Amino acid sequence: MSPVSRRRFLIGATGVGAVGAVAALGLPHATRRDDRPVALVHRGPATCSGCAESVANLLETAPTPLRAVYVGPDEEVDVTPESLAGATLYAQPGGGTVGPAWRRTRAYAPCLREWVQAGGTYLGFCLGAYLAGSDPGYRLFPGRVRQYIGTDDATVADTADTVVDVSWRGRPRHMFFQDGAAFAVPGGDWDAVGATVLARYPNETVAAVVTPYGNGRVGLVGPHPEADESWYRGPGLTNPDGIRFDLGHDLIGTALARP
């Protein structure tokens, strides 16, 4: 779960609708109206270079687009009950290791739990998925979040950047992967927790899932559906499916849907 060190591609804040979004949050320099639902995207020391921007781009290009607002200790907006109250979705991107990231984000746990419980939507990508767990984490997921590479018969053996095979809604696909999470619930009974399992790794452990939390929803993914072409510049990194964002858009749509 170390940062994706080769990534250098950054999308500027104005490129993800920040002007309209800060208007919704009451900040002073907004100049135009933007009626898209607000998605808060955490950016800061708990995320890797470029990861927040890739998640923001994924959200803004979804079939029903959201407008991304970066939040964090060094942003104009931090994660507070007030900022969450104006948002439809909160996204925690990938980043470093769980321990240091948790120390930087654990102050957000009470307000995030309360907000999701009341009907908000949490999206966790890689590290953000680990942080949805409870060892340590926000305690938003009703089971165990662990490293895929530590599961039986895992097809990836180390933490290097790679491409992993998954079955997404029963169809074979390939995704960028770097020490991503796998998910489990007691007894393997996903129906009992009201889950929608979106993807599985080749060893049948779950790679992407959406679960309820109170009146809200929690969407988690171990691989990186937000990965753009800049993520594949390392030696031997090729996605046989091409650079596509439909899996990430499916995750977003499923997490935002309500029964």
Image (cartoon, rainbow, N blue to C red):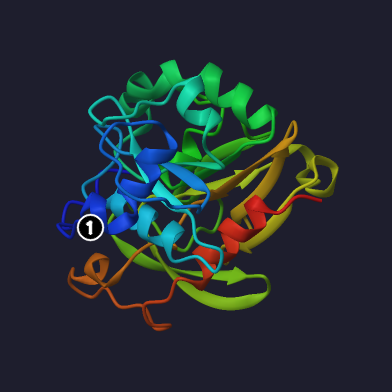
Which image quadrant for residue 143? top right
Left or right: 224 as drawn, with respect to 250: left
Residue 185, how many percent across, how many down? 71, 40
- In the rendered image, the residue lying farthest to the right is 192
Q: Is residue 196 above or below residue 105?
A: below
Query: How many discs appear?
Result: 1
Q: Residue at x 51, y 72 (%)?
A: 246
Identify the residue position indicated by label 1 in the image. Answer: 11
Say whether residue 166 is visible: yes
Q: Residue at x 67, y 70 (%)?
A: 169
Residue 17, how many percent across, how many down? 34, 54
Q: Residue at x 32, y 56 (%)?
A: 16
Left or right: 215 as drawn, with respect to 209: right
Left or right: 149 as drawn, with respect to 256: left
Residue 128, how many percent across, how many down? 44, 40
Say whether residue 93 is visible: no
Q: Camera-side residue: 155 or 136?
A: 136
Q: Is residue 55 above or below residue 78?
A: below
Q: Residue at x 75, y 50 (%)?
A: 258
Tag 1's secondary structure? loop
Q: Is residue 9 above or below residue 42?
A: below
Q: Camera-side residue: 129 or 246?
A: 246
Residue 163, how many percent across, how many down? 37, 68
